[in-house]
């Protein structure tokens, strides 16, 4: 774990975190609206439902503010990183990396040999990041005027 990532406390989200997780996702994805020409899906998620029924984690800074959020789910395809959102004020701080590393540990702990995610093809910086850290594209899918790029990463226990 990097030194930057160590400044974050990672914990499961609680119902008290709904507003902060929602705000984090809205701010993290707001920048993509002009590029996509539509509202990114993570901005409209029901995070109260997600916290109650899925695996939602947060990265909390020393000031006890949520700087990033992670939504994990189990699907027919496997262990999914459904949303990873880093508030713009905390991008580059290690919060996102810490949550991605946590997602991989959770996938392994829960018996999965790989983890997958998807992103919009126009979010080129996200695609580049995921490919740099070992995710490999395996499918593209057009849906509601968006093209999703699916990427998977094989996992090994250390």
Image (tube, rainbow, N blue to C red):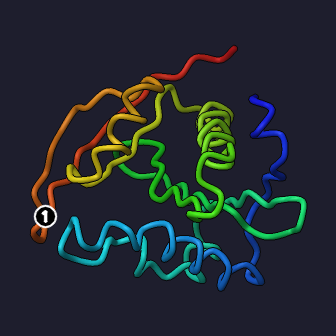
User: Residue 30, position in %: x, y?
Assistant: 40, 73
* Quadrant assignment for the N terminus: top right
Label 1 SS? strand
Residue wearing tag 1 = 143
Using the image as rendered, state which of residue 135 and residue 93 is in the foreground: 93
Judged left or right of residue 149, residue 131 is right
The residue sitting at 49% across, 82% down in the picture is 46
Q: Quadrant of residue 72?
A: bottom right
Number of other residues with Cα within 10 Å of mark 1, as a class: few under 14, some 14 to 19, many 20 or more: few
The residue sitting at 59% across, 41% down in the picture is 100
User: Residue 84, position in %: x, y?
Assistant: 52, 56
The residue sitting at 32% across, 66% down in the picture is 32
Using the image as rendered, state which of residue 43 and residue 47 is in the foreground: 43
User: Residue 137, position in %: x, y?
Assistant: 26, 32
Using the image as rendered, state which of residue 122 and residue 158 is in the foreground: 122
Figure check: 128 above or below 34 = above
The residue sitting at 57% across, 79% down in the picture is 22
Judged left or right of residue 145, residue 89 is right
Q: How many marks?
A: 1
* Quadrant assignment for the C terminus: top right
Q: Quadrant of residue 143?
A: bottom left
Using the image as rendered, state which of residue 60 and residue 52 is in the foreground: 60
Q: Quadrant of residue 52?
A: bottom right
Figure check: 108 above or below 64 = above
User: Residue 113, position in %: x, y?
Assistant: 50, 25
């Amino acid at each position: 774990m990097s030194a930057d990532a160590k400044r974050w406390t990672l914990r499961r989200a609680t119902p008290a975190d709904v507003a902060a997780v929602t705000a984090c996702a809205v701010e993290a994805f707001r920048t993509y609206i002009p590029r996509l020409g539509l509202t990114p899906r993570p901005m409209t998620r029901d995070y109260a439902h997600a916290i109650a029924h899925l695996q939602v984690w947060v990265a909390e800074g020393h000031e006890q503010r949520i700087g990033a959020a992670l939504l994990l789910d189990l699907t027919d395809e496997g262990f999914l990183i459904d949303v990873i959102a880093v508030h713009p004020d905390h991008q580059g701080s290690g919060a996102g990396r810490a949550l991605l590393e946590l997602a991989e540990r959770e996938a392994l702990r829960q018996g999965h040999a790989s983890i997958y995610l998807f992103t919009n093809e126009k979010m080129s910086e996200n695609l580049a990041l995921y490919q740099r850290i070992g995710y490999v594209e395996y499918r593209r899918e057009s849906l509601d005027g968006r093209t999703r790029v699916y990427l998977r990463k094989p996992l090994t226990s250390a």
